[in-house]
Amino acid sequence: MKPHESLLRTFLELHPEDAARAFEALRFLDAVPLFKRLPPGLAASLLERLNATVGARLLEKLDLPRAVDLLIAITPRKASTIVQHFEADARERVLESIPTTAARVLEELAAYPADSAGAMMETRVASLPSDATAQQAIASIRKTPREALHYLYVTDREGKLVGVLNMRDLLLASPRDPIEKFVRHGVASVSDTMNREEVVTLMQERGFLALPVVDFDGRLIGVVKHADALQVAQLEAFEDLQKIVGAGIDERALSPVSLVVRSRLPWLYVNLVTAFMAAAVVGLFENIIAQVAALAVLMPVVAGQGGNTGAQSLAVVMRGLALREIIPGMKKRVIMKELTGGIINGVSVAIITAVVVYGWRLAKGDAAEACAGLAVVIGLAMVVNMGAAALAGALIPLALKALGRDPAQSASIFLTTVTDIVGFASFLGFAVAFSPMIM
């Protein structure tokens, strides 16, 4: 064994999570031979922690029998996620080679929407029959794999979730006591179709280490673990960040170029259209810009302040939506708060900007009246644009939410459009109105 391979194995055994992140940072051509030489146990441990895209690419380089063995060795939820990242032909070959029962589980998990509880649940969950005695329940627990034990869930003969059993009550019970009389009914559970954001919120509110997942008939089919919920919460935050700027939610730092182009290019086209819209507004004022060159210099100042104001408002409202702070009936209050704050900040910034512009143009030798006129123009434009930007930053995500769309989806592109158009139109419009003073 080469020294670097021995070091990698030790790293995987002692620090599996850190090893997975380091493995993802390797060049793919270097990672493949290292992965192939790993023992099955370590390879499965690494695969469990790797990004699904990276894991799929590595498995596609293995012989089919070994790839199938590794998929069977990891949790069904992770295996299902990896299989979904295979090319269509490879996915079909793998599913045909996996034992029927395991393949059915993977296909059922793959059928769930990516943002549902079913897609994030762990299917290996143990339960106790409600008609068992304490002695039978303890014997069953001893035979159950450790990874399948979360809480002591109790089900009836049809597999429907009845409740949960306290371990202390079970251990103190007489061996022949039926566990039914110790079951705590009304246990919190989630539907397999529940949105994953709602699952994360419920888990945070209740403080559970795991939540049972039930199907339409109430049968226990899986469990969502706290660690997975935390990972989903982090993923949601990063996905929202990527969607705000028009990047694909599936894109990662090491994603292939084809995915980068496919996910970003459509929104870049949208951004190009909106940029031409802003340019068209500027084109309406070519004459005044040609006569007062200082206007061209100051235009980015107005647009930039509007963009920053809108981004601040957008971030706060997005946070409110994500954490469910904005409840029904509170939208108007949020909108008015952002608009008022934007106008007040706009007035404050406008005063400073007007003073600076007045001094700058006066130092350039312009007439005092022209300097004052330009200061008034940029001051008024700053108030209008910052107020409009704050309003747009609040309205855009709320409007998208009301339309049933993701409030994060490229919100910054729409916001930039508003701030540029309003900023240029107000600044140059006021310039035309005050042209006798500034020319």
Image: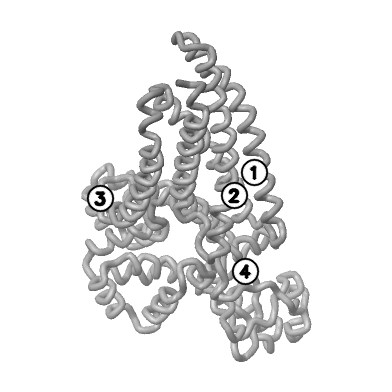
Number of the front mark, 4 or 2: 2
Q: Which residue is mark 1?
A: 339
Residue 74: x and y, percent? 41, 66
Tell me, for residue 306, which label it has, or none: none
Quick one: label 1 or label 2, which is nearer the N terminus?
1
Quick one: label 3 or label 4, which is nearer the N terminus?
3
Q: Residues within 10 Å of mark 2 (few under 14, many from 20)?
A: many
Is label 4 in a helix, a strand or a loop? Answer: strand
**What separation in Å lies between label 2 and label 3 (alpha carbons)?**
43 Å
**What separation in Å lies between label 1 and label 4 (alpha carbons)?**
41 Å
Q: Is residue 251 left or right of residue 156?
A: left
Task: Depth check: give the residue in front, 414 or 257.
Answer: 414
Is label 3 in a helix, a strand or a loop? Answer: helix
Q: Which residue is mark 2?
A: 394
**What separation in Å lies between label 1 and label 2 (alpha carbons)?**
8 Å
**What separation in Å lies between label 3 and label 4 (alpha carbons)?**
37 Å
Q: Which residue is mark 3?
A: 28
- Which amino acid, mark 3? Phe
Residue 48: x and y, percent? 41, 60
Q: Residue at x 66, y 34 (%)?
A: 344
Residue 96: x and y, percent? 28, 80
Is label 2 in a helix, a strand or a loop? Answer: helix
- Which amino acid, mark 2? Ala
- Which amino acid, mark 4? Leu
Q: Residue at x 65, y 50 (%)?
A: 335
* Label 1 with label 2: CB-CB less than 8 Å: yes
Quick one: label 1 or label 4, which is nearer the N terminus?
4
In the image, is residue 356 above or below residue 120? Answer: above
- Which amino acid, mark 1? Leu
Quick one: label 2 or label 3, which is nearer the N terminus?
3
Tell me, for residue 211, which label it has, or none: 4
